[in-house]
Amino acid sequence: MLKQLNPTGVLDLLSQLEVDLLEQSSTSERYKLFRNCVLAVLNVGSHTDSSSEIYNKYEDFDIRLLSRERGIKIELENPPESAFVDGEIITGIHEHIFSVIRDILFICQKYEKDLTEQKAITHMVFDMLRNAGALRVNSDPSMIVCWGGHSINEVEYKYTKQVGYELGLRGLNICTGCGPGAMKGPMKGATIGHAKQRITNNRYLGLTEPSIIAAEPPNPIVNELVILPDIEKRLEAFIRTAHGIIIFPGGAGTAEELLYLLGILLHPDNEKQCLPVILTGPKESENYFIELCKFVEKTLGKAALDKFEVIIDDPERVGKTLKEKMVEVREYRKSQGDAYYFNWTLKIDHDFQQPFAPTHANMSSLDLHLDQPTQQLAANLRRAFSGIVAGNVKDEGLQAIKQHGRFVLSGEPALMADMDKLLAAFVEQGRMKLPGSKYIPCYEIKA
């Protein structure tokens, strides 16, 4: 089956030079990355979180760029039929495909070499968000980043929708990792809240990266999609665009996000930053937050607990609190002369910006001891959880585990015991894989 699509969005008007650049990219080594990201977008609604399973299922899928005097078209060969209705591609999926072209093939032309300077990395994040139209000038703070697991139970999912509804009623917008579970729920709830308030400029921003997009394809509600080059730039994009952050129950990926955030907020230069953070979930998930807070306190200290508030089983309070905090965020940004749409003044150390390759050698050499600066410990713990995420759902991680066995994490006995306990709780609660999938640990903890 062959399908041809016309361009949308920023790519609907291209010069011949830009068309030539896109064609050159589509025949380069970046092609596989481009193809896999488009396949992930087409495969929305998939009931698996295994990247390898999706790629193997659609081995005969292909995509080609067709040059035209007025721009480009794309041709899809053997795409998933679920992406089409009566022979026509679903509009949202159509838009997301061209977001892939924009981010993977077009913008990355400007950043062929690895970036090392902190300012250059931040500029790249800004540049990609700006090019995608995700930075809105002359708009008051309203973007709430929602983190949480792709594998959550029905009670937790309904709770995320209720929180999203309360945010939508108050005119707040939603940004998530764009996948299923706690990434979809807040957006789905907010659509009802926005509809009741007759809000038509509602925003559902999804930030993802190539290695996770197949396991967590953009959910149908995302109306703005940005694909950052790696997890570190994706995380930086989250916190620089956020005016508030909500963390729902989740697994290793959610722990990674929380550790990244706390490591940054604990930096002395960020002591006065105004970025409200709320951990929340239904009553049934209270033990999850108790265990997570214990781990944070034992590793990063009590000061880390002061950087967020825990609200259990009260979506309305979450909505009210964040709406009230938007006034403080606005005043803080105004007092600092900072932009409302991108937090330039937030200090992010280089350790949190450098890409971490989750190889067996890198995982085993992580410094997991308490006797180190808090920020450095947070960065190393973030890397450990990032590697576990890779081993659970990312193609390169799955292949590495298949070839070399489990990742081995070792360090200070007390710290490793706490980490093992937290991960065991994630496994017991079914937070590592989608419901119905048997979880085989990709890691081994050693003291």
Image (spheres, helix red, strand yellow):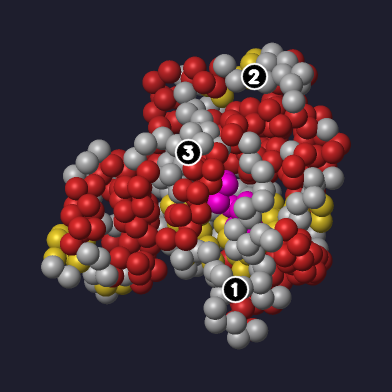
Q: Work out how far the residue at label 3 is from the one at label 2, CA to CA, in angstroms.
A: 24 Å
Question: Can residue 361 be seen?
Answer: yes
Question: Does residue 183 lie above or below 138 as drawn?
Answer: above
Q: Which residue is mark 1?
A: 138
How packed mark 1 is, by other alpha carbons closer than 10 Å (few <14, some 14-19, many 20 or more), is few
- Main structural element of the magenta stretch: helix, strand or loop? helix
**Residue at the disc numbered 3:** 393
- Looking at the rendering, the stretch of residues picked out in magenta corresponds to 234-242
Sequence-wise, which precedes: disc 3 or disc 2?
A: 2
**Alpha-carbon span between mark 1 and mark 2:** 44 Å
Give the residue at x 76% y 55%.
274
Q: Residue at x 36, y 52 (%)?
A: 107
Residue closest to the eye, 176 or 150: 176
Horizontal and vertical percent position of residue 334: 72, 65
Which quarter of the image is occupied by the N terminus? Answer: bottom left
The tag on residue 367 is: 2
Q: Is residue 240 magenta?
A: yes
- Find residue 223 and name its label: none
Q: Quadrant of the C terminus?
A: top right
Residue 366 or residue 430, whichever sits in front: 366
